[in-house]
Image (cartoon, helix red, strand yellow):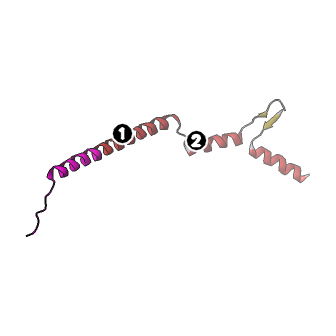
Amino acid sequence: MAAEDKVDVLGIIKVTVIGSLIVYLLILLAEILYNSEVRSLKENEQTSVVRPSDILQRQKAELRGYRWADQAKKKVVIPIDRAIELVSGEEAR
């Protein structure tokens, strides 16, 4: 005669409920972390967005303008076009 298999139904239910709770809590934790990161990124975007076109415009303005490099040593920065003219004029001499 074959022995009857006894299935522990109560144990299966306990494992299923506990496992489901753990999975639910992990999903909830992941959602909280995700929302926290999204909120943090949005705050950082508002304070530190620098577009490449802004950088390029600033660099072009620096190349075209006159300004002090070191006022104490009386050194200035001149526009790049003017510097090229001066250097090419010196080479012609």
Q: Amino acid at mark 1?
A: Ile
Closer to the camera, 31 or 2? 2
Q: x%, y% of residue 64?
A: 71, 41
Question: Quick one: which residue is furthest to the front in this view?
Answer: 1
Q: Residue at x 82, y 29 (%)?
A: 72
In the image, residue 65 sits, relative to residue 9, either above or below, namely above
Q: On the rendered structure, is 77 left or right of 93?
A: left
Residue shown at 21% from the left, 46% from the top: 17
Cα–Cα span, label 1 and label 2:
35 Å
| Most foreground residue, 3 or 81 | 3
Q: Is residue 61 magenta?
A: no
Q: Residue at x 71, y 43 (%)?
A: 63
The furthest residue to the right: 93
Query: Which region is colored magenta?
Result: 1-23
Residue most extreme to the bottom: 1
Q: Is residue 21 magenta?
A: yes
- Which residue was labeled with disc 1? 32
Q: Quadrant of residue 67?
A: top right
- In this image, 40 relative to 18: left or right? right
Residue 54: which numbered mark, if any?
2
Q: Nearer the viewer, mark 1 or mark 2?
A: 1
**Does residue 14 lie above or below 39 as drawn?**
below
User: Residue 87: x percent and y percent?
Assistant: 84, 49
Predominant SS of the magenta segment: helix
Give the class, few, some or many, for how many residues have Cα within 10 Å of label 1's Cα (few <14, many ≥20): few
Q: Which residue type does callout 2 highlight?
A: Asp
Assign a secondary structure to mark 2.
helix
Q: x, y (%) of residue 25?
A: 30, 42
Q: Position of residue 34 (x, y in %)?
A: 38, 42
Q: Secondary structure at mark 1?
A: helix
- Name the N-terminal-most of marks 1 and 2: 1
